[in-house]
Amino acid sequence: MSERLIREVTQAVDRDVGHLVRGADKAVSRLAHGLVRQDVSLGNPDAVAQELHGLLAEEPDVDWMFFGNEAGGLVSAGRLADSSAVFLMTDDFRAGIVREFEALQGGRVGRLRKSEGAFDSRGKIWYAQAKETGERYWTEPYLGLVEPILGVSLTAPVFDKDGKFVGVCGIDLILTQLSRFLQTLEIGENGRAFIIDASGHLIGASGGVSPVKIGADGGHLRLKASEATDPIVRATARHLGRDPSIAGSSSAGPRVFSFSDPERGTIYAAVDHAAPGALKWTIISAVPASDFLRPVYRAAYLSIVAGAVIVALFAVLGLGMVGRTLRPLTALTQAAHAIAKGEWREVPRVRQNDEVGLLAQAFALMTSRLKETLEGLRRSEANFAEAQRVAHVGYWERDLGTDRLTWSDETYRIFGLTPRAGTPVSLDEATERIHPDDRSFWSQAAGKAVRGESRYELEYRIVRPNGELRIVHSQGDLTRDASGRPRSMFGTIQDITERKRAEEALRDSEEQWRAVFENNPTMYFMVDATGTIVSVNPFGAEQLGYTVDELVGRPVKDIFHEADRDAVQRHAAACLSHLGEAMSWELRKIRKDGSMVWVRETARAMVIKKRPVILIVCEDVTERKRAEEAARRSEDELRQVIETVPAMVWTALPDGRVDFINRRVQEFTGLSLDGTSAASWEPEARFHPDDVEHYRSKWHTSLATGHPFEAEVRIRRAADGEYRWWFESAVPLRDEHGNILKWYGFLVDIEDRKRAEEALQKTQAELAHVTRVTTMGALTSSIAHEVNQPLAAVVTNANAALRWLAAQPPNIGEARETLERIVRDGHRAGEVIGRTRALLKKTATVTAPVDLNGLIEDSVALVQGEIRRHRILLRTELAHDLPPVAGDRVQLQQVLLNLVMNGIEAMKKVTDRPRELLIRSRRDPSEAVLVSVQDTGVGLEPQSAERVFEAFYTTKAEGLGMGLAICRSIIEAHGGRLWASANEPRGAVFQFILPSDDSASTAP
C-alpha cells in the first residue's frame, strides 16, 4: 500500500515536470522559428521587440522571451508581477546599458521606465552553450531579483535562412505553477513530495515547505533540502546524500526504498529523475510508516470495541441474534472506516426491518448526504477561490483573543506573500506590511471596530516585500459569542490599485481638459444646429470683448463681419452634413468695440446628448494676415531691388534647375528662362573650359549634401565673348523639417580683384627672389667649400688614375675605380651648383607634390659649411610616414633655409652652452605635416615672438627685417601657418604646418 502510494505521487510530479518541459520546448521552438519565418529584421531592435511581444501573448505559461545577438545586444519582452508588459533593451542593440521600456499595444516601444547595469549577452553561459553546441540549453534554477521565487531559462540558437548563426533566443519560466501543484499533493498526514536539483537545493515541496530562506544579511537565499526545517524532507535528503547510489539508479520508473530515522522511525520513499536530458532534477516522495499504521491501529481499536459490544449483545440476546446482527454491523463498520480515510464506498444494503435495518438505512442516507455536501463544498471552495483570484478579493478572520489572522490564498497574494495554508499570521506581521503613513488611522479604525463603535471599512496602502506599493479596500464585521462579547472579526480585502490609478488618471484628465478649455490662449466655441452659441471659453469671449454670459445663447453669425455671414452659414451646413470630418476656413470676426479680427477656424460636427453640435477652435491670424500683406509688399520691393542691383542673382529648385534670373544675368550671359535651349544652360556653354569640371563637381556636391556653395569661375560675356572672373555663392532655404525648398545664388564681378591679386603675387615673387639671393650671398663661403671639396677630390683621384695607367703593366682595375670616384665627386659638385642655381633662378610659382623630408636633407647639405664653421651640432628627427604636401619646392626650401640660417645666426655668440640645431618633421593629429627648427641661441623676448614676422622688423644689426615676413606669406599662401615660441630652457623654436596632399598620397 505505502509503496504504491509514493510511487504514484512521484509519477504524478514527474508528469507535471514533463508537461513543463514539453511546454517550454514548444514555446522556444515557436520563438526561434518565428524570428526567422516571419522575416523579422534581426538587426532592428524595435522589430524584434514587436515579434517577441506577439509571441509572448500566445504563451500564457511563459513569463519572458528574449533574443541576444552577436554584438552582445539584448531585446527581451516580459510580464511583471502586476501583469504589466515591459521591454528590456540594450542601447543600439549591442553590449551596453540595459534599459526598461513600457510595452504599448501592438508591441510598440513606449517610454523609458528605468536603466539597469551593463550587459553583454555573449558573456552569458546560456548564450555560449547554445552557440557552441548548436542545441537547446537549460539553465540551472535561479532566484528572482524582484521576488524571492525560483525560475529557469531555456535557450536555443537562431540561424537565418542561409543557415548562418545570428544569435540566441530563449524563454524564462517562473516555477510558481509547479510549486502550486506540489502544494496540492497530500501524502498521508506527514508525507512530503519535493524536487531537488543537481546541487541538492530545493526547487519545490509540498506541505508549505519553502525553497527559499532568509540569509544573515536579511536577503533571500536558496535552501538545501538537507537543511530544510521539515523533518521528513530533511531526513530523506540527508539519507540520499549518504547513499547517492539510490538517486543515481538508472532503472525505469521510480525506485522505492526505506530507511530508519531516529525521530520518525521507518520512512518509505521513492526517487525518480525528471525529464532526462533536459533538467537534472530529482523527484522524491517520502512518507513515515506511522501514517500507514495509525489507521490500522485505529481500525483495530474499533474492532476491539465492536467485539466487546458484540460479546455483550451475544451474552444478552444469544448466539442466534449475534450471528444475524454481526454481519451488517461489520459491513457498516468497514464502510465507516473507509469513509473516515476519504475512500467512499457503497453502504451495504440490509433488508431487515428491525433496528439494524433502520440503522443501515439511516447510515446510507447520511453517507449519501455527506458525500453530496462535501462535493458541493469542494466545488464552492474552488469557485470561491477562483472568484477571489479573478476579482482580486481575499478574506481574512481575526481572532480577538490571540490577535492571530487567518488569510485566504488571495489575501496572501494581495500582500505579495506566498500562501501558507493552515498557518495563522500574527497581527504584528500584517501591520508591518501596512504603509508607515497609514498605520495610525488603520489602527484607529480597527480599534473602533473592535470596540463596536463603528463598522470596519477603510482604504489604505500596503508595501509588498519587493517594495511595490498597492492600495487595498478592506471591510469587516464583528462576530460575538453567546454572551454577546466580541469573539472575532471576519472581512474581505480587495486590491483596488488599478481602479485608484484609473480614477486618478480620469481626474487628472478632466482637470487638464478643464484647464485647457478655460485657460488655453485659444478661442473655443460650441454651436448648435440652429447657429446658436452653446458654450465659449473665457479667453474666446475676452478676445472679442465680451463676457461668457454675453455670448452664450446669441446667434454666432452676429460676431462675424457682415460680408462673411453667408459663408458662415455655408460652412456650418457643410459640417453638419459631414459628421466627424474636420473642416477649416478663414473669416473675419467683429469685436464688441467694432474692430475686426481675422480668425482661422477648424470645426468638426458631432452628436452630444443626442443633438448635433459643432465644435470650433479659433486661431487669431490677424497678425499673420498683416504679415502676409507686408510680405507681398516686401516681395515686390525685393524684386525691384534684385532687378536693379549691379550683380547677377538667381534662384533654383532643390534639384538645381534654375527658375529665376535677374536682368543682370540676362544682359551679361544672353540667357533667358523662356527662349533659351537647355544646352545653353550647361556649364560648357557659359564657363571657361578650365573651370567647367571644378565648378560642376562643387555644385553637384552642394546639391547632394545641402551645404552652401562657393566658387570662383570665369563666365563668357555674350556681347563680345570675353571671359571675366566672378565669385558665385549659393545658400539653401529650408523648411521646418530641414528639407531644401530653394537655392538662392549671387554672383559678384571680381575681375579687378583677380588682376590685383596677380600683380601682388608677382611682386611677392620678386621680393622672395631678392631674399633668396640675399640668403645665398650669406652662404657663399659655405657653398664654395661644398664645391671645393669634391673638386679637390677630383684632382687627387685624377692624379692617382694617371699613376695606375703609367704603371707597367697598367693597373686597369684600380684606374677604373679611381675614375668612378671622379665621376661621383663631379656629380656631387654638380648637385651643389644645381641646388644653388634652383634657389637663385627667377621662375614662376609651380605647385606640385613636395617631399618635405627630402627638402630638409637638401637644405642641410647647403648649410654644412656654416654648420662646421660655427661648430654647431645639427640633428634631424624625420618621420618615416610623412605624406607629401602640395606647393612650390623652391619657395618652401627658401623658408627652411631662412629658418636654419636664423638659428645659426642666433647661436654665433653663444659660449656658455652647446650650440645645437634640431630639425623635426612629423604628422599633426589633423593629418597635416608639422616642421620645427629649434636652436639654443639667444632666444626671443615674449613681446617680440609675434613681431619678428612684421615687415622691416629685425633683431639683427645688419638685417632688413623681410626674411620672416616673406616666409610667413609663403606658408600662408600654401594654406599653412608659421609661428615662433621660446625653447626651454634657452633658445627659440620656429614651426610651420602645411596640409597634406591627399591626391598625391593616394595616387598609385
Image: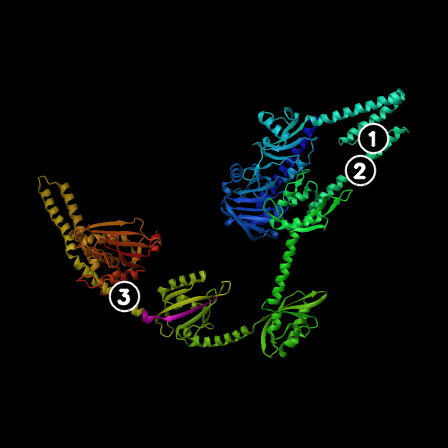
Say which amino acid is labelled 1: Val
User: Which residue lies under the disc numbered 1?
Assistant: 347
Q: Is residue 463 left or right of residue 855?
A: right
Q: Are marks 1 and 2 in contact (CB under 8 Å)?
A: no
| First to last magenta residue range | 741-753
Look at 63% across and 79% down and name the residue there.
562
- Quick one: SS at disc 2? helix
Q: Is residue 869 left or right of residue 919?
A: left
Q: Quadrant of residue 648?
A: bottom left
The quadrant of the rendering that contains the N terminus is: top right
Q: Name which of mark 1 and mark 2 comes first in the sequence.
A: 1
- Quick one: SS at disc 1? loop
Say which amino acid is labelled 2: Glu
User: Which residue lies under the disc numbered 3?
Assistant: 761
- Asked whether residue 212 appears in the rendered view, the answer is yes
Magenta-span inclusion, residue 216: no
Looking at the image, residue 444 lies above or below residue 230: below
Magenta-span inclusion, residue 745: yes
- Residue 640 is situated, as x and y percent measured from the top left of the image, at 45, 77
Looking at the image, residue 548 lies above or below residue 143: below
Badge 2 crowding class, 10 Å Cα cut-off, few under 14, some 14 to 19, many 20 or more, is few
Say which amino acid is labelled 3: Gln
- Residue 121 is situated, as x and y percent measured from the top left of the image, at 51, 43
Q: Name which of mark 2 and mark 3 comes first in the sequence.
A: 2
**Marks 1 and 3, Cα distance to the nearest angstrom?**
128 Å
Disc sitting over residue 372 in the figure: 2
- Residue 164 is situated, as x and y percent measured from the top left of the image, at 52, 42
Depth check, front residue: 35 or 383: 383
